[in-house]
Image: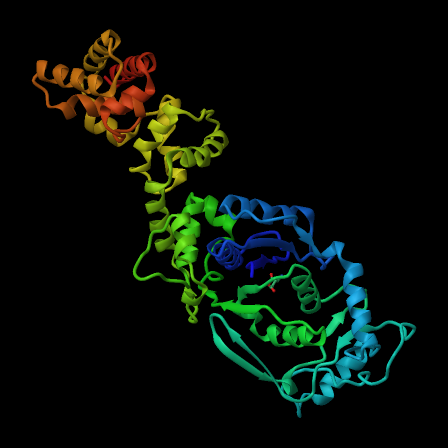
Amino acid sequence: MTVRVRFAPSPTGFMHLGNARTALFNWLFARHHGGEFILRIEDTDRERHTEAAVQVIYDSLKWMGLNWDGPVLRQSERLAIYHEVAEKLIAEGKAYRCNCTREELEAKKEAMKDTVNRSCYDRTCRDKNLGPDCGTHVVRFKMPLEGESSFDDMIQGKITKSYKDLDDFIMIRSDGMPTYQFAVVVDDLALQITHVIRGSDHIDNTHDQIALYHALGKEPPRFGHAPRILGLSKRKGSPSVEYYREALGLLPEGLNNYIARLGWSHGNDEIFTMDELVKAFDICDVNQANGQFDEEKLIWVNEQQLHIVPIEKLASYVIPLFEKAGIHVEAGEWLNKLLEMMRMRAHNLNEIVSGSRFVFVAPETYDEASVAKHFNADTPELLNALADELEKLDNWDPAAIEAMMKAFAEARTLKMGKVAQPARTAIVGIAQSPSIGDTIWFVGQKEACARLRKAAEYAKSLG
Ligand code: GLU
C-alpha cells in the first residue's frame, strides 16, 4: 500500500503554527514511508477566502520546504462532485433533504435546551422523503440511531462514541455549498488517502466522517490526531509562520525542527536536519499531551540550525533579506566566506544581515561609547599611519592584515587592542566586529583605508 496523506488548510490569510505543524507531520510521514503528500485547499467558504490567502499557503509551505506531490486540489472546483455523491446518498436513503427554517431550528433548540444537553437536530424531516422541489433546504446525513462509532487513533488510541450522541449533520448547505464534514470525506476518498493526520480539534468530527465512509460502503483511512500547541494565543503578534519567520529571523530548518519536537520526541535528541527528521519520524511517537509553545526554545533551536545548515542554503535565505535591507549581494565563494564568519556570531538571519552591514555600507556615525573608550589625541595620526601601511600591503589576506597590524602595534609598543579597537570603530562604526583581519579584508583595501582616514578627520575634529 502506498501511503498517501494530505494537508487540507482553509485559506485564512495566514499559516497558524499549529497548521504548519500538521503540514510538517504529514510531509514527514509521507517522506518517511516513501509515500505522497497532497495539498488540498478547502476554499468552499466563499465569503472568507481570497486568492491572496491561498497564496500565503503556497508561500509558507514552499518556505518550509514541504513540497507537495501532484496538482493542488481546490474544493471550490469540485462542487458538482459533492452534489453527485449527496444525490446518491439521498437515493439510497442514507441522506435526506430538510427544509426546516432557521427560525424553526432556533425554536426547537430553545425548547430542547432543558432536556438535551447538546444542540442537535430533532430529525423532523428524516423520514419525509422530501424531493428537490421542497423549497429552500439543506441535505442532512442519516446518522445511525443505535450502536457506537469507534476508531483506533494512531496517536490517541481507541476513541468511541455512541451514535446517540451524533447529529444528522448537514452535508450540503442551503446555498448549495458542501460542509467541511461532507467534502472532506468525498475528497479523501477521491484522493485515496490512507492516513489522515490533523489536529485533535477534529477528533469529534471523525465519528461523523467514519459514519459517512460506511454509508458510502468504503473503508475509512487511519486517523492520527496530534495534540494542540498551547500558549500561542496569549503572545503578541500573530501566531503564524510569517510572523515568527520575520520577527525572529528564522530559518525554515529552525522552525521545522522546533515544531516537529513540539509534541513529538525521539529519545533526548533535540537538533535534527530535515533528512534526520524524515528518517526518525514515527507518528506513533507523537505525544498525546498538548505541547507548550516556548519562544526561547524556538530561538535556541533556530540558532543551532544556523550553525549547521549547508552554506549555500544559508546564502539563499539571506540574499533576499539583504535585498530587503537595500544591499545587493551575489551568491558565491565570497558570500559563503562572509556567512561562515557571521553565522557563528549571529543568533538568527536578521542578525546576520544587520551584523554584515558594515561590509557594504560605511558608518555614518560612530558609536559614542566606542569613541569615548578608544579615540584620543593620538588617534588621527594612528589611523592615518595604519591606512598608509594597509595601502602598501601586497598580500590582501586576513592573516597578512592581522600580521601587519601586530607588527604595527609592536613598533609603537602598543598592545594589539590599542590599534584594533580604534580601527574597528573607524571601519565598522562600533568597536565590535569579527576578527580585525577578517573585518578589514571583507571591507576591502581601498574602502578600509578611506574609512580609516575619514575617522582620523573625525577624531581630529573632537579636539
Ligand atoms: N480545513 C480543515 C482545517 O484546516 C482540515 C481538517 C482536516 O484535515 O480534515 O482544519
Residue 202 visible here? yes
Residue 11 shows in this picture: no
Q: Residue 220: percent from the left, percent from the top?
A: 62, 71
Q: Which colour style is shown?
A: rainbow
Foreground residue among 317 and 73: 73
* Residue farthest to the front, as pictured: 1
7 vs 304, left or right, is right
Residue 263, percent from left and from top: 42, 64
The image quadrant that residue 80 belongs to is bottom right
Name the foreground residue: 343 vs 209.
209
Identify the residue shown where x is 42% and y is 58%: 281
Q: Position of residue 358 (x, y in %)?
A: 35, 26
User: Where ligand 1 lies, by image quadrant?
Assistant: bottom right
Residue occupying the point 28% across, 20% down: 440
Residue at the far bottom in the pictured view: 115
Q: Is residue 320 above or below residue 258?
A: above
Q: Residue at x 64, y 55 (%)?
A: 40
Residue 273 % position (x, y):
38, 48
Please say if 184 is above or below 377.
Answer: below
In the image, residue 115 above or below residue 284 = below
